[in-house]
Amino acid sequence: MVTRASGTRTFRSDTMGTELRPLGVACNIGCQYCYQHPQRDVEPPVKRYDMEAMKAAVRQEGGGFTLFGGEPLLVPLDDLEELWAFGLKEYVRNGVQTNGTLITPEHIELFLKYKVGVGLSIDGPEDLNDIRWAGTLGKTRSLTQRTEDAIAMLVQAGIPPSIITTLHRGNATWDKLPRMAAWFRELDAMGIRSARLHLLEVENDAVRVSYHLSPEENVEAMLYFSALEDELATLRFDVFQEIEQLMRATDDKVSCVWNACDPYTTSAVSGVEGNGQRSNCGRTNKEGINFIKARRVNYMRYIALYHTPKSMGGCQGCRFFSMCKGHCPGTSINGDWRNRTEHCAVWMALFERCEQMLQARGELPLSLHPARETFEQALLDHWRKDRHTSLKHTLIRIASQQSKSPDMRSKGGLDCE
Amino acid sequence: MNRLEFSIPPFLSVAWVSEEALKHWQPIFKQLNQALIDTTLSGVAQGVWNSRRIRIPGAAVMKLPETAKALGLAVRSTQTGLPGEKGPVFHDVVIQLRHTSQPGDTAGIPDCCVARHNEMQGNARQESIWESAEATPGRKFDTDTITLHGGYVHGAVWHKLLVNPFSYPLCHLYCPTTLRLTTEHLEWMRAESHAGLADIWADMAHWPAEWNASHGICEMRTPVVKLAYETDATDRPFRVRFDGTAWPTHGAFGLDFPYRSPERKRMTDSQSFKNGVDLLRNL
Ligand code: SF4
Ligand code: SF4
Ligand SMILES: [Zn+2]
């Protein structure tokens, strides 16, 4: 099971361009909220793959790959080895995104031998992970234990995984947060360095009703983890770092969700299926159809959101727009990518918190900067030309255009190297 | 339909449901486009119609003046969009015999549709599908969604991918004059040895399809391909569903209209999945 389509990868590497899905979305468990269920609902399970077709497609995409699923460790060891040997030879290193339940010592040997960075999805210890359902409660709990054992094995082998945790009623209501905090403290003590927190986004009504946190609960949980981060030695929740980077216009490495993703091309994510077919990030797949990527990227969603009033699903007038841009199209209100994210209230609260923090440090965040509207216009100009660029580069360009007015730097906060 | 005060620059995104669908349909659409242009020109030249108004996507218009001249036709072509604007190019072309008078503003538009044409021009509208659907007899209306059955005039539905042989805002989507012209055009295509393409084009009017517009972006979904393009900006989604009975080769299974839904959802209808929902809800 996959907690979220890539793009927001936690083990970061410049080589991790493509998601290779030999067995499509096949998985050994059935997390209740998996965003790939629309595809599972419609498609028969993939049982075969073509090694040469996959390698050829990866080469065409260029830039390395992460093994992805569903659960990629359903692929037999020999074939995993062949793929990672190919990855190491051609792209220097490898990656895998797994639920961790199938990791054996043999897998760990391969991870070490072929420099495989491991991303692992788990929502907490014991019952807090029950939503990552495996058919019965007994089986679910035993597989959760196997994932926890896998984390320990990976740490012991000197390759601590990055963690992806999705927040929902099963692990992030106020009564459960202290247990989550204790768990993250343990992971921190073990030497885990990176965790990504995801907000639940699910189409299935029954699951949504049971597990969705209210915006207030999501905000509370996020702020709780943000405060927890201050106590942790090495573990960082990358979402808070990214928000700060965006607010300081040092965003050249932030994840896809902040980068004006076009749902027809999802440029941060190129999927390669077992038969070599190229596809988009599964986050946008609401119909259960693995559409082929469109040929040309465009940013019309963002132009529309900028102009559409908030009451109608847009972002008009939001001072965080340059940074947030309405967020991932796969999380849009009513599953309609022309709307802003349904988690707007959460992101807004986190941007506000970061704004206050930067101000307390004597910095001027982009949201309050006199040049904010110039930024927005620069982004819109780019989008009209079917281009997108980071805030960092936008800042450099604006600063060079306005070199006679050193205002941009003198106000403090924004770094223009 | 509540409009917002902005416009989206022209664009066109095309996403096919599968490689098979792409390989099968893209060449057919190319042939169909050429056949629609050729038969419109030959039909006017041979007096089947006095004049026609068609919309042609992209480069297909290049050879048109030469062919028209050879056939003794007068052609007035207007490129859509603003001068210098980026984005996909379309041409609205009015065709008539050269010895008749200069084509007027409404040449090629049936009398019944002129009022709609004037209304759309007056309001600087880009598309008229919603208004035409609203005026269609027998349409079903349910909170911002209009449903019609197959057999409608489908040129405007496909106008970003295919030649629209009736490029004017329709009085309604079963406009009798335009449907008669469609029948004539199909007969003429068959007479001009395009019987296979004529059958496909006729069939497409019975494919399920959905036009839906929100925030200035239209998403047009058909069983084999979906398109996104600029349209009039509205405050919320407005949908027109064409509830067809025909189904194309390589049409996709999917969860929403217009795709064919599976009888049972393999994952979320499974007992094991439901057990999880029930059990965890009560924990
Ligand atoms: S849809 Fe785009 S922004 Fe969202 S997760 Fe996928 S690649 Fe990232
Ligand atoms: S915080 Fe909300 S309104 Fe502001 S840009 Fe993000 S999604 Fe839009
Ligand atoms: Zn009419």
Image: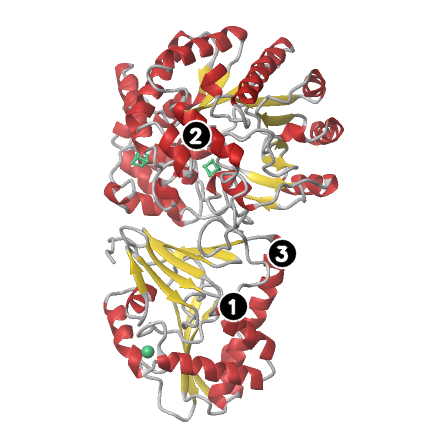
Q: Are marks 3 and 1 in contact (CB under 8 Å)?
A: no
Judge whether residue A412 can be spotted in this image. no
Whether B112 is drawn above or below B29: the answer is below
Q: Considering the image in quadrants, where does the N terminus of chain B appear?
A: bottom left
Q: Position of residue A161 (x, y in %)?
A: 57, 18
Mark 3 vs mark 1: in front: 3
Where disc 3 sits, the SS reads helix
Q: Position of residue B265 (x, y in %)?
A: 51, 44
- Position of A104 with respect to A147 (left or right) is right
Q: Give the mark, 1 or 2, whose residue is nearer the N terminus.
A: 1
Do marks 3 and 1 share a subunit?
yes
Q: Quadrant of residue B115?
A: bottom left
Which of the pair A363/A117 is nearer the observer?
A: A117
Q: Amino acid at mark 2?
A: Asp
Q: Where is A140 relative to B50, above or below? A: above
Specify which label sits upstream in the sequence, 2 or 3.
Answer: 3
Q: Which residue is mark 3?
A: B20
* Callout 1 amino acid: Ala
Chain at tag 3? B
Q: Chain of mark 1?
A: B
Q: Residue at x 29, y 74 (%)?
A: B117
Residue at image point 31% right, 26% down: A351
Crowd band around label 2 with a 10 angstrom C-alpha radius: few (<14), some (14–19), many (20+): few
Label 3 crowd (10 A; few <14 / some 14-19 / many >=20)? few
Quarter of image, res A120:
top right
Asked whether mark 3 lies closer than 8 Å to ligand 1, one says no
Question: Which type of secondary structure does the marked residue at label 2 adopt?
Answer: helix
Are the residues under badges 1 and 2 in a single subunit? yes
Q: Which residue is mark 2?
A: B278
Q: Which residue is mark 1?
A: B59
